[in-house]
Image (cartoon, rainbow, N blue to C red):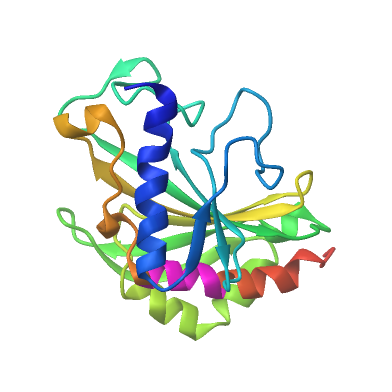
Amino acid sequence: MTGVTQKFVGIDALCKYYQELGMKASILPDKSPEAVEKGHIKQDMGYIKVAGREFDLVTIRMKGTTRGEYDLGKVRGIPIATKDKIPFEYHHIVRAEIANEGVMKVKLKKKTKGIVGKEVTDVSWEGGHLAEALNSDNSIKTSIMKFIEHEDSIKIEPDKKNKIFRIVFSRPSEIKMGLAYGFKFNRNLLPREAVDVMDKIAILARKSASSKR
C-alpha cells in the first residue's frame, strides 16, 4: 500500500466517526487552500473540516514520525514490534489571531496512584496564562476525569505564523500485524467525551488568544 493510501485510511475512519457523533464533517481535498501545512514535507495526515463546533479542522499525527505519509513498519528507523505501543495524536485545530504564544502554551498534568495499572486521581493545567482559566473551569476537569488514562496527554500548541492553535489529545495504540497495511482508527483512542472536551477547551482558548500577558 502506498503512502498516499495509508494517509487517508485513518482520516476516512475518523471523519466517519465524527459524522456518527452528529457532526458535519468532510475531508479536505489534497492541496486544499484551507489546509494548514503546505509543501512536500508534512506531519499532518490530511485534514477533516468540521462545522458547528469550536474547532475548525482535525488531523492525526503519529509520534516519532517526520511526515504524515509514514511507513507503519518503522518509527525513527526502528522496526515496530508486534505489540509496541505508539501514541497517536488527534489535533483539533482552531483558527485565531495569536497575540502571545506564551499565553497559550499549556499542558495537562496528571496525578496518579499505583505502580501497575496506574489510576489518574487528579488533573491540572500548567504553562501560560491560559492554564489559570482552564484550572478555574470545574466542568472541564470533571469531563476529563471521566475518560483520562495515565498514558494520555492533552496540550495546546499555538502557531502564530499560521494563525491557529492546536488542542492535542494523545493516547497510545498497540500496533499489531494487521496495522502494517495502514492505520485503522479505533474509537476507543478518542472517546466522545474527549471530543466534547476539545470543544470546551477551544472556547476558553479563543478568549485567551488575543491576550498579550
**Considering only vertical position in the picture, is 111 above or below 176?**
below
Which residue is the extreme one toward the top? 77
Q: Give the range drawn in magenta.
A: 193-200
Where residue 104 appears, as percent x and y from the top left, is: 69, 59
Left or right of residue 34, residue 48 in this image: left
Is residue 178 left or right of 42 when viewed as pictured? left
The quarter of the rendered structure image containing the N terminus is top left
On the rendered image, what quadrant is the C terminus found in? bottom right
> Observer-nearest residue: 85 or 46?
46
Quadrant in the picture for residue 167 = bottom right
Whether 6 is among the magenta residues is no
Q: Is residue 39 above or below residue 166?
A: above
Residue drawn at point x = 67 percent, y = 43 percent: 36
Residue 30: x, y in percent? 58, 36
Taking the image as drawn, is residue 35 in sight?
yes
Q: Can residue 83 be seen in this view?
A: no
Q: Does the magenta stretch include residue 198?
A: yes
Between 146 and 114, the one lying in front of the other is 146
Q: Tell me which corner region of the image, top left, top right, bottom left or bottom right, holds residue 209.
A: bottom right
Q: What residue is rendered at 69% in x and 48% in y?
A: 34
| Residue drawn at the location 37% of the way across and 15% of the way down | 77
- Residue at 36 percent across and 22 percent down: it is 71
